[in-house]
Amino acid sequence: MIVLAVALIGGLMLSRLTKLINLPAVTAYLVAGLLLGPFCLGALKVPGLGFNSAEQVEGLGIITQTALGFIAFTIGNEFRLSQLKATGKQAITIGILQAVLTTVVVDIVLIVLHFLFPHIISIPCAITLGAIASATAPAATLMVIRQYKADGPLTKLLLLVVAIDDAVGLLLFSISFGIATALSAGHVSVLSVVVEPLLDIVLSLGLGAIMGILLDRVEWFFHSRSKRTAISVAFVMLTVGLSMLEFQIGPVHIGFSLLLVCMMTGTVFCNICDTSEELMNRIEGWTVPINILFFVISGAELDLNVLAQPLTLMVGLVYILARSAGKYYGADISCRLTRQSLPITKNLGTTLLPQAGVALGMVHSAASLPDGALARNVVLFAVLVYELVGPSLTRRSLISVGEIRPDGRTSARTINSSK
């Protein structure tokens, strides 16, 4: 409890410093995690002062999973039918096309690197990293939008694209990892490459839809705002728990995507519940401390040992440059095809650079590859760079299109004292 309190207070206090240099609060929380992590203050082994070991950080996984669930549930709010009718087709096209183009670019670059230096990276590892490159971090993007109260065409499109991007990324990873595993083992399994990924996505969407309908039905039993908020929070936590279940039916492994399940729950609930907008606002306020802890813990999870590995740094730099080019030009091409305005076309790609939890979850699965350790370290290095730089680039892009006012933040203390 002391460690969690120190993490929360440390993240909040550091956000006051980053505000002076116009950096998003997300960056402050991540840096606070690095400072409190097992490679900085935590290394002093003083009880309560930071995270003393990587195992201690991993033990707080329930907090990060819960935070991701609430973030995905909130993003589901953006899939209202009224909004989908306006921008749904364009968002789906952009979300799919930029993710696929990013994977193709990274695949090509890393496979070329393999042929130039076969001892550095294998083709299975290159293919797996290409799929991981497609994923964008929804949490960092959403936190920047919330902090600066961004609103406008780019913001609305971005939230939809990020949600679609993660769904496409999970499918691309499942297929690519299945191919990589087959190449390593010497035989291809249609079950693991095609059937299981599609089944996971269908079951995740189905479970999310059921939970969204149940939440709407149960919510009718309560009339006070506090109890309706409590039952909504309980249902999201229940959904997170159910999405973490795994089981085997014959030769088929069944699992769920936490992000897809919770996104679908939020989408269905927001489209069938008349008071969903009010409940979403109340849940957003309730989850602020959990979201801050999510980023502090994410910062503490970053392994600084990768900075001492020249091989990892080299492959990681190639991965970062290739992924950044894929995201930027993939978004640019897809925006032109869907006839988006010039400001959106120029800035959407930059807002898709942040990468964190989803990619780390993917690379955890990739650990079974012969050079899975290289894939893990490359992604860790990329996440370190993207999470520290990405939120600032997202903020800058939203300012450049006029959807964040540079002086748009107000003081609740000033507002309350004036009433």
Image (cartoon, grey):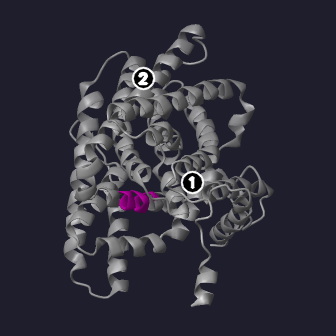
Q: Inspect this view and state whether residue 372 appears.
A: no
What percent of the width, then of the height, locates residue 129? 49, 29
Q: Which residues are magenta?
A: 68-75
| Quarter the N terminus occupies | bottom right
Q: Amino acid at mark 2?
A: Val
Q: Quadrant of residue 120?
A: top right
Q: Amino acid at mark 1?
A: Glu
Mark 1 crowdedness (10 Å alpha carbons): few <14, some 14-19, many ≥20: some
x 70%, y 52%: residue: 34
Q: Quadrant of residue 330?
A: top left
Looking at the image, is 307 positioned above or below residue 286?
above
| Quarter the C terminus occupies | bottom right
What percent of the width, then of the height, locates residue 130? 46, 27
Please state which of residues 47 and 298 is positioned toward the viewer in this rendering. Answer: 298
Looking at the image, is 248 positioned above or below residue 206?
above
Please state which of residues 113 and 364 is positioned toward the viewer in this rendering. Answer: 113
Q: Which residue is label 2 attached to?
A: 104
Left-right relation of 198 to 46:
left
Q: Which residue is label 1 attached to?
A: 58
